[in-house]
Image (cartoon, coloured by chain):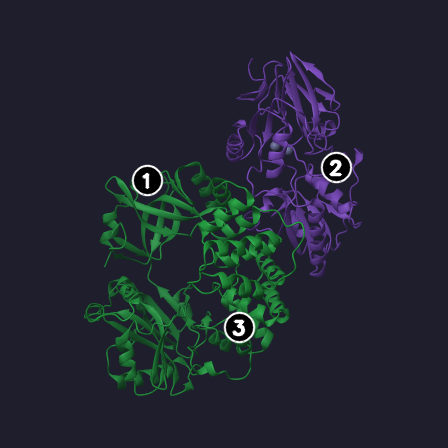
Chain colours: A purple, B green
Amino acid sequence: MHADLVQLRPEGLYCPAGDFHIDPWRPVPRAVITHGHSDHARSGMGTYHVTESGLPILLWRLGQQDYHAHPYGEAFTLGAARVSLHPAGHVLGSAQVRIEVDGEVWVAGGDYKRQPDPTCEPFEVVPCDVFITEATFGLPIYRWPDTAEVARDILEWRDECAAGGEAAIVYCYALGKAQRLLAEIGALDDQPVWLHGAMDPGVDIYRAAGAQLAPTRRVADAAKDESFAGRLVIAPPSAAGSPWLRRFRRAQQGFASGWMRIRGNRRRRNYDRGFVISDHADWPDLLRTVQETGARRIIATHGDTDALVRVLRDMGVDAGAFRTEFGGEET
Amino acid sequence: MKRFATLYQRLDRSTATLDKRAALVAYFREAPARDAAWALWLLAGNKIGGARARLAGSRELRTWIAEVSGTPDWLVDASYDQVGDLAETLALLLDDPHEAAEEMSLADWIESRLLPVANSSELERRDVVVEAWYTLPFAERFLFNKLLTGALRVGVSRGLVQQALAELSGVDIALIAQRMLGAWTPSPDFLAGLLSPDAQPGDTASPFPFFLASPLEQPADALGDIREWLLEWKWDGIRLQLIRRNGEVALWSRGEERLDGRFPEIEAAAQALPEDAVIDGELLVWTDGDAPQPFTALQTRIQRLKPGAKTLAQTPARLLVYDLLELAGEDMRRLPLAERRAHVAGLVGRLDDRRIALSPEVVAQDWADAAMLRHEARARGVEGLMLKRRSSVYQHGRKRGDWWKWKVDPLTIDAVLIYAQAGHGRRSTLHTDYTFGVWDGEALVPVAKAYSGLSDAEILELDRWIRQHTRERFGPVRSVAAEQVFELAFEAVNLSKRHKSGVAVRFPRILRWRKDKPPHEADQLDTLKALTR
Ligand SMILES: [Zn+2]
Ligand SMILES: [Zn+2]
């Protein structure tokens, strides 16, 4: 037996055999980046290994850097490690990192989900000896409803708002969630969706990658007297409570997130509506994925890992946790 | 069930009172009478089958959901900890049924499923509950669980429900409120009577809704000429309606409970009243001397049905009379207070029994004089002053403008946070129920629980701190490091044998978070004891 292929270091997850880090939170010479969310992709690294489809997102988020873009599934060599990137189903271009050294295989799953998502490559089960899994929603109360069903709820709510002369503002993250919502809504309805300025770059990148999204218009381009009654508006959570809201004379506000599964979270933040849509695996999918990889050992990162680790141990799996600095921006 | 679940959702989502009222009106207009009667029962805060009906205990529900969902017990508890609401946790732990079962009405669920198994064996009760879990979709499953675990807590006051019913039926809201006082059953007959414009048999037998004073927020001299105001002490007892009609006496507390049999000395004195009447007053324990006994003395009396001679001698009760609502069968509530008071003064004057006596008028020359008197309140064993406009009619509920309570400034201490627990409803994911202690030598003894007084931002900050500084967990309760000091306000401190600390504080709440104070500078138990009376 040799040393662990991935270890927790103060600067992030580190692969000694390949001398590289995965999604490090401090500057390092060589980084493999799973996806563009800010808790995973940070600036200051010497070189960046990314997926081809994720590259435009990193360019948007981090600007020009020393990028090495790899197609999914194509192995490349870093030190003594054979590395390849595989779809994680989380957002456009998101990856799991497969590391093979002397016949032993570790997979770092990054952020992932198993629900269908028309805007990104579906999750691929990568068999491995050790699987590093996220546990953002690591309790059995987190079970996602069908996304198309949720999209229908949003449209129904928009129509209720129309009846009351109100705009329907949905807050969600600008990378991934917004585009997924636009795709799901576009499949049901052809009215334009209005976008907060922060949504533009992500939407453009997804469209350029071929995603079929609902028609969109920019709130910034709206006529001064534009009535937003009955219009669906998508904005980042940071816009809640900001002066930007003033132009919607009357509005209801909703939030699209896995956290909205719990009523208290919605009420505490005073949203009128909560829509349960998440780009992370829910509890049943965490357990399913861990089993499907066939891994003999599981390491959990993100969020409340205690419950998942304990359940896996009770099932006889060798399970532990890494205390990472992931989690925070996107949920 | 679906219709009521939809109503619940609308009420839960809305923060605007008008929306909530509209939702209630729509529901009561459309729902079948049997359902509507149960909905009213539940919205009024009642339990299915009353307080004694056992449907499912919290521990049982957790055990059943663990079995049904294949979740270990500890993980059910961890989930409950995260959610903070048991009914919701139970609903969240299961997936929706693949096929929706046939719709069963709210009344049918209650009358043909739940009530028949109330107080029966665990197995029978479990069968009914689990069947519901397997067949109801999320929103209805959640609501069903709410029916099992007690109060709905959906941010709807009784008053709002009554407003909706008044709007729907055209019946005066005061009459609706009056008809809903006391005991009633959730039946279509009751609902029909409640919403009927015609006089109902019960209309004469029941108490009137109480008129409540609001806390005085502006300076007293903004109230204008003091001669237009009646000043009285604000007694710290139990607000009560004494009803004597056709020679029969009934006592109703403001909590709408009948207190008959608990205060025989008051009932006996009322029998001797020269005329039938409905009197509004305050019940106190008063031995001899100038001041009543503290509230704790009254507490021992409330719990005792048919008190013995010894109790009656040690803790004799008195009713201090504020107001007259009915005299010899005639409703007096539309008369100005000055006239009602003149009538009631004559009535109790002729009775001449100190057990039922007029609450004396407090005479002040001007507002400055009144303010001085208010400062004497604590020494007199009262909570402050009541200010009532002499021309005011007797309204119902808490209406601002005519009746004010001008309480004495609260007592304060600095205490250390020692336990925290998740709150309910809106704040269920946060720790908002706090227990505070003061020093008794080297140890902190708990002296007060408080739920309110912090801003939303402080609640969030404190919640984070609590999670990071938890010492031990006992179910939902966490003990925390003794580091955070808070200034607490309260109305009074009484000696108490029932409390470990030996004292009971009345109406504690948080004034501010004293981040500047180290815990060893918090107050001593002796300081608190010195404030008792
Ligand atoms: Zn992410
Ligand atoms: Zn993440």
Read off the residue under disc 3: B187
> Would residue B423 be seen by someone viewing this image from the given angle?
no
Amino acid at dot 2: Thr
Of the four image quadrants, the one with ligand 2 is top right
Label 3 – label 1 distance at C-alpha = 56 Å
Q: In the image shown, does B455 or A272 lie closer to the viewer?
A: A272
Q: Which residue is mark 1?
A: B519
Give SS at disc 1.
Answer: helix
Q: Is B200 left, or right, of A192 in this rendering? A: left
**Residue visible at 60% across and 59% down in the picture:** B5
Towards the viewer: B421 or A175: B421
**Image quadrant where residue A81 sits:** top right
Which of the two labelled residues, at mark 3 and mark 1, occupies the earlier sequence position? 3
Number of other residues with Cα within 10 Å of mark 1, as a class: few under 14, some 14 to 19, many 20 or more: many
> Which residue is label 2 attached to?
A119
| Mark 2 close to ligand 1, CB under 8 Å | no
SS for tag 3?
Answer: loop
Q: Residues within 10 Å of mark 2 (few under 14, many from 20)?
A: many
Kindly state the secondary structure of the residue where label 2 is placed. Answer: loop
Q: Amino acid at mark 1?
A: Pro
In the image, residue B439 above or below residue A3: below
Asked if labels 2 and 3 touch by Cβ distance under 8 angstroms, the answer is: no
Chain of residue at mark 3:
B
Q: Quadrant of the N terminus of chain B?
A: bottom right
Residue B351 drawn at (x, y percent)? 26, 84
